[in-house]
Amino acid sequence: MIHSISQIQEGILDCDGSCRDFNLISADRVAVSELVAWFYKRFQNISANGNDGLELSSESVLETIIGLSKSSYIQIVGEGPNFIIDKFQIFLCVTESGDIDVEITIFPQDIDAKNFDLDRFLGLINSWRTMANADEGYLRYENASWVHADTSRGSGVIYVSKST
């Protein structure tokens, strides 16, 4: 895991061709719905699809999160200028325990690097964790084999957001 402030900033802004994922797990489906609603309020051009491939309206996305089953998922993609990030993707699925696994994906090239402020960015992702009522959130380099909560050397975790 990266520890120094400069390494955290470098890990966030490193345009190496991979994305950055912010992963958290929440048992509070209403809170996850509120997190998704936050994105709908701040970004334009948002589209959402369920595992059946059908597009979901903003209202139906929030309802679908509440009733999401273990065999279902929701993918949300959006963009909008004039924010810390220009584009995002969210993937929601249900864990074996019934909690919602949230993965918010951003690409370094979609971050306003010229005006980047690390405290503001970390405040943003910490607020996402708080909104989702999750105990921890992991900002990491893209890694398909990553196991939730793995912060070992080589895991690609850049920053861990924890409730106090």
Image (cartoon, rainbow, N blue to C red):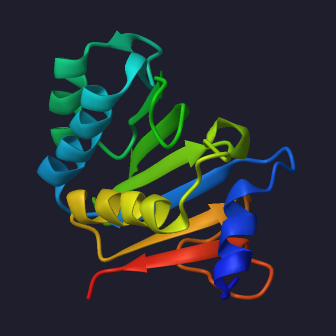
Q: Which residue occupies the foreground of this view, 82 or 50?
A: 82
Is residue 77 positioned above or below 11 on the image?
A: above
In the image, is residue 121 above or below residue 108? below
Q: Is residue 96 visible?
A: no
Who's the residue at 54% across and 60% down the image?
Answer: 117
45 vs 42: above or below: above
Residue 159, percent across and down?
A: 57, 75
Q: Residue at x 21, y 65 (%)?
A: 133
Residue 141, position as x, y percentages in the image:
71, 61
Residue 99 sits in which quadrant?
A: bottom left
Point out residue 108 in the picture as x, y percentages from the top left corner. 70, 46
User: In the image as oriented, which residue stretches furthest toward the right?
Assistant: 16
Which image quarter holds the N terminus?
A: bottom right
Q: Residue at the location (49% across, 24% down)?
A: 81
Judging depth in this view, the residue of 20 and 95 nearest the camera is 20
- Locate residue 47, reporting x and y percent: 42, 16
Q: Quadrant of residue 17?
A: top right
